[in-house]
Amino acid sequence: MRVTKRTPAVAGMFYSENPVELRHNLSELIVFTKEKIEAKGVVVPHAGYMYSGWVAGKVYGAIEPPQVAIILGPNHTGLGDRASIFAGESFITPLGEVKVEISLVEILVNQVEFLSTDPTAHIHEHSIEVQVPFLQYINPDVKIVPICLGRLSFEEILTLGDALYFAVSQYPGKVLLVASTDFSHYVPHEVAKQKDSLAIEAILKLSEEELIKVVVEEGISMCGVIPTAVVIRACKGLGAKKAILIDYMTSGDVIKDYHSVVGYGGIVIY
C-alpha cells in the first residue's frame, strides 16, 4: 500500500471538521503562558477535544513551538506493523496540510531495523492525528514525523529511543518529541487518580524502566506506555534533566460521571 497524503480519520468525531470552528476551539483550549518552556518532549492525551483537549492545550501553550514534532502514538486499531513510521508526504487536517520531515524519517529507518514504512497502521489511528491541529495552531509551518507503536520489548524501546536521540541531535532545527497517551481507562475516578499518580511519578523521575514496571505491576491501562517510555529515553539522551506535571484530570471531571473514567495527564520534559 502506498499513501502519500494521509487524510483525517476522526475529524468530525474527536474534533471539529469545520476549520473555523476547530480554530476557535483551539483558541479556547490552548492557554498560552508568558514564559515558555524549551521542551525536549511532552506527554499529552488523545481523547476527543471536549474530554482531554483542556489538558493538551495547557501543555502546548506552555512550550516553545517546535519546527518539527516527532509524534509517537499507540496503535489502537491493531492494523499494520507493530512499529510503523509514516514515510509519505503529509498529513491533512481541517486546518490544512502538514508536511512530513522526510530527512528524519530516513535517518530513523536506517537506524532501526524493526521500524516499518508500511502506512497501514496510520490510516485509521487517532492517537497521532489529534495532536496535529494543536501543533498547527502554535506553529502553522510545523512539520511532523508520525510513529505508530504496538508491542515492543524493553530492548527495542531503548533502541528506538536512542535512535530518536541520534536523529534529533543531527537535525539543525528545533524538534519536539510528543508521546501521545491516555492513562487509566474505564475505572472509577478515585482508582484512576491513584493508579495514574504512580505512572506519572515514574515519568517525572524520567525513568522508562520504572514506568513500564509500575504499569505492568499495577495493571494500569495506559495505552501509550510504550511511546512514553521511548520518549523518556530519547529526551534523556538529548540532555533532559527535569519533567513537570502541567495538569491531570479525568473524563469524570468533564461529564460528572465518576463511575467509569479515563485519565488524562499533561507533562513537559525539559
Image (tube, rainbow, N blue to C red):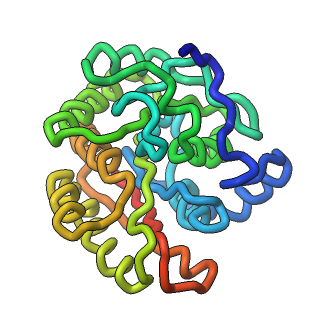
Q: Is residue 35 visible?
A: no
| Left or right of residue 242, residue 106 in this image | right
Specify the quadrant that holds the N terminus: top right
Q: Residue at x 68, y 37 (%)?
A: 8
| Left or right of residue 92, residue 196 in this image | left
Measured as percent of width and height from the top left, residue 246 is found at: 45, 67
Measured as percent of width and height from the top left, residue 172 is found at: 42, 22
> Of residues 195 and 242, which is closer to you in this image?
195
Say above or below: 137 vs 252.
above
> Of residues 41 and 208, which is closer to you in this image?
208
Say above or below: 140 vs 61.
above
Q: Residue at x 35, y 31 (%)?
A: 83
Of all residues, the one furthest to the front in this rendering is 78
Say above or below: 81 vs 110.
below
| Left or right of residue 134, residue 79 in this image | left
Dividing the picture into quadrants, the one containing residue 202 is bottom left
